[in-house]
Amino acid sequence: MNQDQVRKSRALPGLIVLNAALLLVLAAMTFSPGLFAQSTSRGEYICVSGNIQGSNIPVTWILNQSTQELVAMSYDKQKRQFTGLGYRSLNTDAQTGAR
């Protein structure tokens, strides 16, 4: 046996163990319940983009479905940041409107 064959024969058990460990991790990830990459513990969000009537500034409305809060934001290209335009609590609006 030359040195290459000796190295290969020593590496084979390590590779088998590594493959078995990776297979176990894959099986655990595949069969574990309730993994959602996009969900958060604080809420679920809906985003809608559009323009405000009479303005050409694009606006993004973000609704947190869990807390029923709505935020309007625009993006300032020169400053490279979002600017908050307004906030509404839809729960408060619904309670006020029902009276």
Image (cartoon, grey):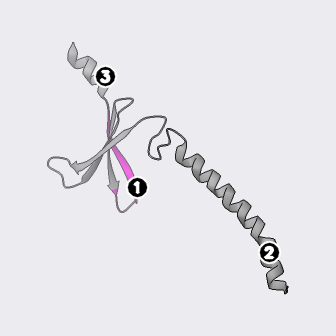
Secondary structure beneath dot 2 equals helix
- Name the disc covering residue 81, or none: 1
Image coordinates of residue 52 in percent, x first then y, are 19, 47
User: Which residue, as the protein is rendered here, is positioned at the far top?
Assistant: 99
Image coordinates of residue 81 in percent, x first then y, are 40, 55
Left or right: 63 with respect to 20? left
Tag 3 or tag 1, which sits nearer the N-term?
1
Image coordinates of residue 22 in percent, x first then y, are 64, 57
Image coordinates of residue 88 in percent, x first then y, are 31, 32
Query: Between marks 1 and 3, how big is the CA–CA gap?
Result: 29 Å
What residue does disc 3 label?
92
Look at discs 1 and 2 and give the one toward the viewer: 2
Query: Between marks 3 and 2, how big is the CA–CA gap?
Result: 71 Å
Q: Residues within 10 Å of mark 3 (few under 14, many from 20)?
A: few
Look at discs 3 and 2 and give the one toward the viewer: 2
The residue segment tinted magenta is 76-88
What residue does disc 2 label?
9
Q: Is residue 4 magenta?
A: no
Left or right: 27 with respect to 48? right
Tag 2 or tag 1, which sits nearer the N-term?
2
Secondary structure beneath dot 3 equals helix
Left or right: 43 with respect to 12? left
